[in-house]
Amino acid sequence: MRLAIMLVFVTVVCGLVYFVLTHPSLDRLQELETELSHLEAQNQELADRNAELERQILALRDDPRLAERRARESVGMARPHELIFQFDEEDGPTSILVHLEVRAQGLELAGEEIEMAQLEDRLAGLAEELPGAELRVRVDESVGPIERQRVVDIVEASRLGPGKWEDEG
């Protein structure tokens, strides 16, 4: 009788151990632990970054040299017996105007006759050579709607597009 009870007890314990070790939630637990360790590492990196930013904020707020620099730059303050020279800055890069003439007999881009098949490549080349360029497109009334739409599609897809459109009448 004792032997039977012992065998039942050992069988139940072995079954429980087998169930626990082979249950799918054990794999999920390992995945969650891995994710938790990654998140904790990321959290520590962010905490370190926040601490560094806080040190920078305190330094910027409390550093008298920085306060002096800000006063000099923003309102033009100077020390006694100090001369400040201020120079006007240029207004920026000058815009370059590029003309595209669309006629029934062909295209003229920047004064040069080109074919419709070349238009896309030529516009891309101009956009790289002249990054601030502005495109003006003049379309002759004799140009058909299909050819006009091809030009519109190519111009709008280019980096110079959409351009300013002028119809000749």
Image (cartoon, rainbow, N blue to C red):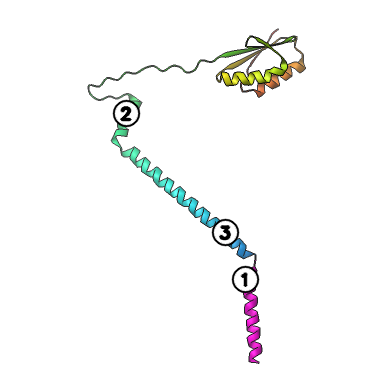
Q: Give the magenta part as a residue range.
A: 1-23
Residue at the (28%, 35%) spot, across then down: 64
Residue at the (62%, 71%) spot, across then down: 20
Amino acid type at image mark 2? Ala
Q: Which residue is mark 2?
A: 71
Q: Is residue 31 magenta?
A: no
Q: Is residue 4 magenta?
A: yes
Quadrant containing the N terminus in the rendered view:
bottom right
Residue 26 visible in image: yes
Label 2 Cα crowd, 10 Å radius (few <14 / some 14-19 / many 20+): few
Q: Which mark is residue 35?
A: none
Quadrant containing the C terminus in the rendered view:
top right
Q: Nearer the viewer, mark 2 or mark 3?
A: 3
The x, y position of residue 113, in whole percent, is 68, 10
- Residue at disc 3, secondary structure: helix
Residue 161 visible in image: no
Mark positioned earlier in the residue sequence (2 or 3)? 3
Mark positioned earlier in the residue sequence (2 or 1)? 1
Q: Which mark is residue 32?
A: 3
